[in-house]
């Protein structure tokens, strides 16, 4: 599985206008790719627009990036300043997300950690799988977690967590960061993005 993450720090039109355009224009294009798996969008605490998406492989993920850039080029007024991008192969994928965005359950609350200084070693992977992952997966309100290493930065990574609510997500984040300080002291959390999903689309896979 390949994960894409985008963040646009400033917006030039109303949020509802952007959300409607994403759902009506961008999502149909992304969903048409055979390797599409999921797409989530939220507004973070600084008011930035954030999207987190997953695809079966790097090729499909990169095609989706091209599609998103073309969509952005057709709506230059949406995001006046340059956006930030992350893409990487997931080495951990745990949990399940509902296919439908409706129903009785609210859309998930996302908390994403952007990391630097992550050693590319078997010891790192073993620590994550044996120590960090159980803490996240057993946390109250847990729905899913995706962990990916950056395609661009050798020591970069991102962890996207999905929870029922903010309180559960924050408590789990604090516990996970505490473990990192203990077992992987070279790792630093360079940014935390969080917010309730306003758009959620999960494919059939």
Image (tube, rainbow, N blue to C red):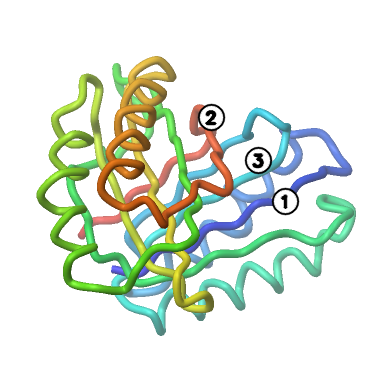
In the rendered image, the vertical position of residue 70 relative to residue 175, given as above or below: below
Q: Quadrant of residue 163?
A: top left
Q: Label 2 to label 3, Cα distance in Å?
A: 15 Å
Q: Is residue 73 left or right of residue 46?
A: right
At x 17%, y 36%, the residue is 137
Q: Label 1 to label 2, Cα distance in Å?
A: 14 Å
SS under mark 3: helix
Residue under label 3: 19
At x 29%, y 17%, the residue is 104
Of 176 and 101, the residue lying toward us: 176
Residue under label 1: 8
At x 37%, y 37%, the residue is 177
Residue 33 locus on image (x, y percent): 40, 73
How crowded pointer 1 is (Cα within 10 Å; few <14, some 14-19, many 20+) is rated as: many
How crowded pointer 3 is (Cα within 10 Å; few <14, some 14-19, many 20+) is rated as: some
Q: Nearer the viewer, mark 2 or mark 3?
A: 2
In the rendered image, the vertical position of residue 163 relative to residue 55, given as above or below: above
Circles 1 and 2, Cβ within 8 Å, touching? The answer is no
Image quadrant in which the C terminus is located: bottom left
Of 26 and 7, the residue lying toward us: 7
Q: Residue furthest left?
A: 130
Residue under label 2: 195
Q: Quadrant of residue 127?
A: bottom left
**Which one is earlier in the sequence, the residue at label 1 or at label 2?**
1
Residue 51 locus on image (x, y percent): 55, 50
In the rendered image, the vertical position of residue 183 relative to residue 86, given as above or below: above
Image quadrant in which the N terminus is located: bottom left
Residue 81 locus on image (x, y percent): 86, 56
How crowded pointer 2 is (Cα within 10 Å; few <14, some 14-19, many 20+) is rated as: many
SS under mark 1: strand
Q: Is residue 26 left or right of residue 92?
A: right
Q: Nearer the viewer, mark 3 or mark 1?
A: 1
């Amino acid at each position: 599985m390949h994960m894409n993450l985008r963040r646009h720090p400033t917006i030039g039109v109303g949020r509802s206008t952007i959300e409607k355009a994403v759902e009506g224009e961008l999502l149909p294009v992304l969903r048409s790719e055979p390797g599409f798996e999921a797409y989530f969008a939220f507004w973070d605490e600084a008011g930035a627009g954030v999207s987190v998406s997953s695809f079966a492989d790097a090729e499909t993920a990169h095609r989706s990036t091209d599609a998103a850039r073309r969509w952005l080029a057709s709506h230059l007024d949406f995001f006046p300043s340059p956006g930030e991008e992350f893409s990487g192969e997931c080495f951990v994928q745990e949990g399940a997300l509902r296919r439908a965005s409706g129903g009785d359950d609210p859309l998930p609350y996302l908390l994403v950690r952007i990391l630097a200084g992550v050693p590319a070693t078997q010891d790192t992977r073993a620590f994550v799988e044996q120590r960090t992952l159980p803490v996240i997966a057993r946390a109250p309100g847990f729905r899913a977690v995706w962990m990916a290493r950056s395609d661009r930065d050798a020591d970069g990574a991102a962890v996207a967590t999905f929870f029922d609510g903010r309180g559960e997500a924050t408590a789990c984040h604090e516990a996970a960061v505490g473990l990192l300080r203990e077992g992987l002291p070279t790792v630093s959390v360079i940014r935390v993005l969080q917010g309730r999903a306003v758009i959620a689309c999960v494919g059939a896979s």
